[in-house]
Image: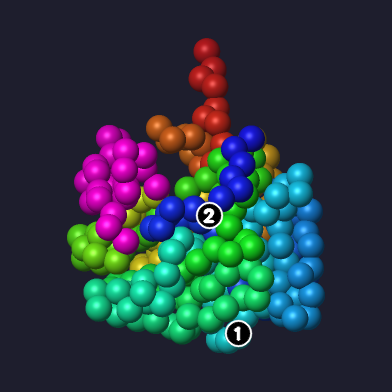
Amino acid sequence: MPTRDIPWPPGTPCWLDLSADDVEGARDFYVAVFGWSVTDTGAEFGNYQMCQLDGRSVAGIGGKQDRAVPTAWTVYLASDDVDATAKAVRASGGRVLAEPFDVPGAGRMSIAADSQGAVFGLWQAAGHIGAARYNEPGSFLWADVREPDPDDGRRFYAAVFGHTHRPVDGAPADYTTFHLGADPLGGIGGMLDSPHGTVAHWVAYFAVADADRAAEDAEQAGGTVLTPGHDTPFGRMVTIADPQGGRFTVVGPARPEVG
């Protein structure tokens, strides 16, 4: 059970949260799928829901600031100076959608869009480091960003965070992983199987023990399977929309070959 107690390195995906119209409904759905326990942080923090596994934070659920914005998961990249990173976002062709602000006792954050328009968060840890459990069933596993022009996306993230990029065997030619050292931190590529008209966006992946069972649990809780279970070199994947339209992908072990 990978756990973490210190802030994530700058440029690393470190947290994710869902912005929903119906926070209680979203909470109930994800508890049914992932088995989370959930703590309401109180009115001071907008009743943000902290989702946990065995007492360690894995994700958050909060209400939307703008109900015209679709329900979606936001991936946050760590920063040791959110204000400076926000300036770098602007200088590299992105936009700052929410100016840096403090979350008392937890950290400092901002919401930005990259040069292709994909929305992501910035998180400067204080009392809250981000994900404290990861890479295990019910927790954050991976994130990638889908771009109409992935080369421009790579340029943007390299300029802002210092990412380097490497091709991936078995992946589309325009898909690369991004790095700050030897280990891959996430991916960046073209729009892949996104429906026509989909804008640039980040995709959140959650680990599960059984991808098909997770899909069944999601459907029973009111969700919709968008991409049925399929085996990949990286595990068995299912893409799901929650009852409010928030999309995510679950990844479990590949099915054993029969015969």
Residue under the point 59% across and 38% down: 2
User: Is 179 colored magenta in this rendering?
Assistant: yes
To which residue does mark 2 refer?
A: 7
> Which of the 4 quarters of the picture holds residue 95?
bottom left
Q: Which secondary structure lies at badge 1?
A: loop
Residue 236 image offset from top left, x and y in percent: 51, 37
Look at the image and tell me in which quarter the N terminus lies.
top right
Distance from the alpha carbon under mark 2 to that under mark 1 = 27 Å
Residue placed most toward the observer, 108 or 39: 108
Q: Find the residue positioned furthest to the top.
A: 259
Above or below, 231 against 46 in this view is above
To which residue does mark 1 refer?
A: 65
**As shown in the figure, which amino acid type bears the numbered disc 2?**
Pro
Crowding at mark 2 (Cα within 10 Å: few <14, some 14-19, many 20+): many
Residue under the point 72% across and 53% down: 52
Q: Is residue 134 visible?
A: yes
Residue 109 image offset from top left, x and y in percent: 51, 73
Residue placed most toward the observer, 41 or 229: 41
Label whose residue precedes the other's in the sequence (2 or 1): 2
Residue 111 image offset from top left, x and y in percent: 47, 76
Range drawn in magenta: 161-185
User: Is 171 colored magenta in this rendering?
Assistant: yes
